[in-house]
Image (spheres, rainbow, N blue to C red):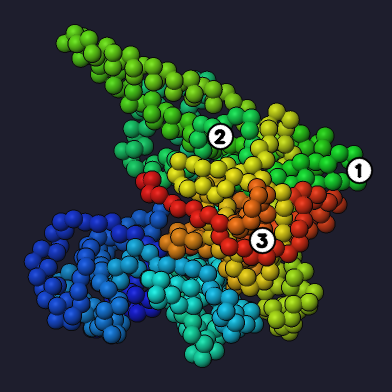
Amino acid sequence: MTQQIDTRFRYRVGCPKLPASPWGMMYIPSPSVMDGHPFRVRQILSANNVKAREVIFGHRHREGKQLGGTPALTILSDATIPTDYIQEWSRTVQQLSQYFSNSGVDISIEIMDYQAYAGVYIKSISADNTELLDRWDQKQGEIADCFRKLRWFSVDLVSRGIRDSNMRPTMLVNASDTDDDAWTAALEKAQEIISDNGRIEVDVELLHNEVGILASSESELPELSELSAEEFDEKAYEEKLYDRKKSEAISREEYVSPRVVMAEDFGANLHVGASVGHSDDTSGTLGGFFTMKFPEYKEPIRFGVTNHHVLARNTRERIDRQDKAVATQSIEVASPSDLDRERFLYRLRESIMPLNERIRDAKRKYQALSDPTLRVDRQDWRNKRAELRSTRDKITALDTRAGALFATSGHRQRADPCYSDGEDLEVSRASIPSPAVPCQWNVDWALFTIDPHRKIIEYTKGDTVWYNYVARRKITERGSICQRTAYDVAMLGRTSGWSTGVINPAMSMLNPTIAFTEPGDREETPLLAHAIVNLDPLQPFARKGDSGSFVLHNNDRDGVDATVLGLVTGSSKVVAYMTAIDLVATDMEEDLGGEVIFPRDVGEVQAGTLFKRVVYYDDE
């Protein structure tokens, strides 16, 4: 029986059904199942004029998931060479599938573009594409209705392509159930709506995305928590570490990432972009600082700002404002977070472990050979170990408390005056009669008081060892953004460090049922969010742990002042989401009965040109 060829995804053709991107491949270098077949595979490719740049045999998998049971043969080619790559690749896949079936080999076949395998570019949509943007504003409710019974997380309107020269307007759907057959019909219906039955040029793509909230909470290091700081046994630790490595329970990215916390982050200084959390299982970003004035207090109060889901992850309800005296006894806020301190201590202990082995080995060799150079080496290693142990002991004993939780927004929604006062009719939601059109924004902020022993650093960090720097600036202003305008922006996050990007002229839709509410809740109307894409078209703007970061205007203005435009609240694999800072400040003032007096409000900000681009270097 002839199997159906899957052509749902751009630059990919396969049989049987293909998984939505992103997915990984566990490469098998010498598979016995392929013995005797490579020659016939090359013949079929040659007969169909398909040039293979690389042939990969292995098992597909998703991040954090087990390998697939059926092996996959992935052939990397060039989608720009055939006049109709879908037709030629489909014919080739059909012949390869038939050949392996006749040979009794159970295998999935796929041909995809070699650049798409490395990653599809993503950029902001052009603000000049007014017809598509108008259609997007008017039909978001109908599009969301197509996905009502599916587990979608967000829908973005961006530009996508495998090269700068072939970027196309694309409606990007992020979901966690991309293998559900219902997506085929849902995407076809959404394509008809957004394209006005083919009249407007726009593609539709489906991406797999498990989680959209960025607070890092999945890594509690349970085995390591059993080893107390007071009774730390390096030998026992080495045994535990060996067992964990042997079982591949530790991933290098998760536990040994160099960009999260460094030694200089431990101390009295409290800076923009620092790690922050309130318990041993959450870590987010300290976006910056707000100063608020309250009628009942003589002096203004300085607060640290982050997300509700960073400091109050276990509840969607708001935490009421605390009296200053009471706040000192409420939920404690740590910076760096307890989790990040444990991660840093883990890296220190991992550095101590090989030194212990070298010292023991040098002692045995010296006793056998009486080589004086071994004594010198052993002393050097002892000095290095003593230095690491001293750092470990200081950080273990350090008081990382930054302050106490003052108030949080909870997971709430509210309208933005820009979309309800009718002043800007071309994009005003009030001018669109359909009640299904999204008009609410997610509100996700948290304020915490700052203890006297912590010193607030007013200026953002400058150069780091991993990237070129964005100019060192002081955040003194907050501003409103013009709609349908591409702003160059920068973010200093706990995980990403400096990241630069562009606010997308088209707003994104978020599904509150998946992203922002408890299981079982059903929110009928999606939420709105400003989307940010990275200047590097293959990199995300924000990563796990960057929640709560301030989004700064990255303009070419002289001076050292910086203007904050938004607060990062979440992210998909490729797009970050923010709530406008003017809406955040307004919600704080209305909810708490105070006034945000710093950073000062400068009103509407004009989009400036990029003054400095951050370039990432490969540090893996």
Q: Is 150 positioned to the left or the right of 138 in the image?
A: left
Q: Which percent across, then down, holds residue 203?
A: 46, 80
Which residue type carries mark 1?
Answer: Glu
Label 1, label 3: how far apart the Cα atoms are: 29 Å
- First in sequence: mark 1 vs mark 2: 2
Between 449 and 169, the one nearer to me in the picture: 169
Expressed as whole percent of the image width and height from the top left, the position of residue 202 reads 49, 82
**Does dot 3 land on a helix, a strand or a loop?**
strand
Q: Position of residue 42 (x, y in %)?
A: 13, 72
Note whether 91 is above or below 287 in the view shown.
Answer: below
Q: Earlier in the sequence, mark 3 or mark 2?
A: 2
Q: Determine the image quadrant of residue 553.
A: bottom right
Q: Are marks 1 and 2 in contact (CB under 8 Å)?
A: no
Q: Which residue is mark 2?
A: 265
Secondary structure, mark 2, is helix
How far is mark 1 from mark 2, CA to CA? 35 Å
Q: Residue at x 80, y 51 (%)?
A: 596
* Residue under the image location 38 percent in, 64 percent down: 119
Return the disc, 1 or 3, that comes first in the chain's sequence.
Answer: 1
Residue at 39% from the left image edge and 20% from the top image edge: 385
Disc 3 to disc 2: CB gap under 8 Å: no
Task: Please determine whether, in this image, residue 571 is positioned above or below residue 431.
Answer: above
- Please tell me which residue lies in front, 513 or 112: 112
User: Which quadrant of the view contains residue 269?
Assistant: top right
Mark whose residue sits in front, 1 or 2: 2
Amino acid at dot 2: Asp
- In the picture, the quarter occupied by the N terminus is bottom left
Checking the image for residue 579, the label placed there is 3
Find residue 296 and name its label: 1
Residue 287 placement, left or right of 406: left
The amino acid sitting under disc 3 is Thr
